[in-house]
Image (cartoon, grey):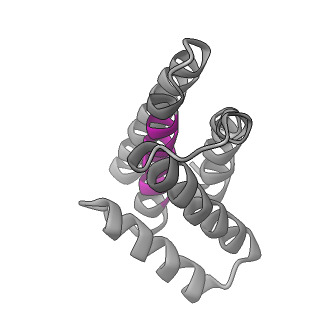
Amino acid sequence: MTTVEANAAQVFEDARLMRDAALERLAAGDIRDAAEKAWCATMRATEALVLARTGQEPGKSTDASHRLRDLYMSDRDPSLKGLRDRYYGRQEILHGECFYHGHYNPAEIGLLVNETSDFILDAERLAQV
């Protein structure tokens, strides 16, 4: 395993830890904190994907967003487009609408929090880690 692969694996592990924390907060009824932790897990999985595919670790959330877009534009991989679209949807709903503004549908947030595992698995598959 190369250093980049090992580092990406560590970031994916952090994403799974944040996903677990999101599920715990959801079970406790703390919707907004669950949403933010699910968003953090999403961002960490994206950072790991970017690191695995480019060798560059994003320094801030906008770096991950830009590099994910760049990956899609350079590869034109439909799987990357799907993940990119899911990433931005999760950013808008979990991070923006729910966490920051307190506007949410509990059923929708519950679904997105529970789907965080799928996002991480898809990012891992695309990273080929």
Query: Among all residues in the image, which is located at the extreme left?
Result: 59
Q: Residue at x 73, y 68 (%)?
A: 79
User: In which image quadrant can residue 31 be found?
Assistant: top right
Find residue 119 and report its horizontal and vertical position in percent: 65, 47
Q: Is residue 129 above or below residue 18?
A: below
> On the image, which quarter does residue 59 sit in?
bottom left
Name the quadrant of the N terminus: top left
Residue in front for this viewpoint, 53 or 21: 21
Depth order, front residue of 75/46: 46
Query: In this rendering, does residue 1 appear at all?
Result: no
Compared to residue 43, the image places residue 53 above or below, namely: below
Tell me the residue at 60%/44% (across/down). Answer: 104
| Residue located 67% across and 41% down the image | 105
Image coordinates of residue 13 in percent, x first then y, are 46, 32
- Is residue 124 at all visible to an observer of this figure? yes
Q: From what the image shows, is residue 121 above or below residue 114?
A: below
What is the magenta range?
35-49
- Residue 76 is situated, as x and y percent measured from the top left of the image, at 67, 85
* Count of marks, rendered view: 0
Magenta part mainly helix, strand or loop? helix
Q: Which of 88 and 6 lies nearest the eye of the viewer?
A: 88
Residue 42, horizontal then vertical, whole percent: 52, 47
Residue located farthest toward the top when viewing the structure as drawn:
28
- Please tell me whether residue 39 belongs to the stretch shown in magenta: yes
